[in-house]
Image: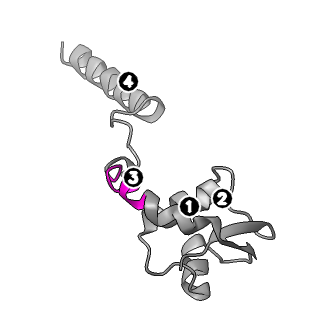
Amino acid sequence: MKRLLLFISFCFTLFIIYFDLTTGTLPPSHPPATTGQPTVPASKPASAPSADYKEITMKPGDTLLSIIETEKVGSNQPIETIISDFQSLNEELKPENMQIGKTYKIPVYK
């Protein structure tokens, strides 16, 4: 009887490990921007000047934030505004999908 209980426990443990690795037990994470949706409409008037942009070619190690900091084109804007304006200028491209050697439009704020 102990062997049967041990075998069932072992099989159950293997099933739990398999299920956790393939499906997972954590709920899907939502991007933090969903909690900031009320600020997006408020930042839309601030993004109106985003028609102005500067084209920059990516170099190794560059990120959207590092470009914003070095070029001083939007350091006083919230990061959510910068990201949404960047995506609207670059055909909904996410900043994490930027590639080295390609040219992107970076919003300029006045």
Identify residue for label 1: 85
Q: Is residue 9 left or right of residue 28?
A: left
Dot 2 or dot 4, earlier in sequence: 4
Query: Disc 1 versus disc 2: distance between alpha carbons?
Result: 6 Å
Which amino acid type is shown beneath numbered disc 1? Answer: Asp
Query: Disc 2 versus disc 3: distance between alpha carbons?
Result: 17 Å
Callout 4: SS:
helix
Please provide the residue range marked out in magenta. 36-43
Return the residue nearer the eye: 51 or 17: 51
Residue lying farthest to the right in this orientation:
101
Identify residue for label 3: 41
Which amino acid type is shown beneath numbered disc 4? Answer: Phe
Identify residue for label 4: 15
User: Where's residue 51, x and y in %?
Assistant: 63, 65
Density class for disc 1 (Cα within 10 Å; few <14, some 14-19, many ≥20) is many
From this view, report whether residue 9 is shown above or below residue 91.
above
The tag on residue 89 is: 2
Dot 2 or dot 3, earlier in sequence: 3
Which of the 4 image quadrants contains residue 16? Answer: top left
Is residue 94 in view?
Answer: no
User: Where's residue 75, x and y in %?
Assistant: 48, 81
Callout 3: SS:
helix
Residue at x-position 32% and y-position 28%: 13
Return the residue nearer the eye: 52 or 80: 52
Of marks 4 and 3, the one in the foreground: 3
Q: How is the image coloured?
A: one colour
Query: Disc 4 versus disc 3: distance between alpha carbons?
Result: 47 Å
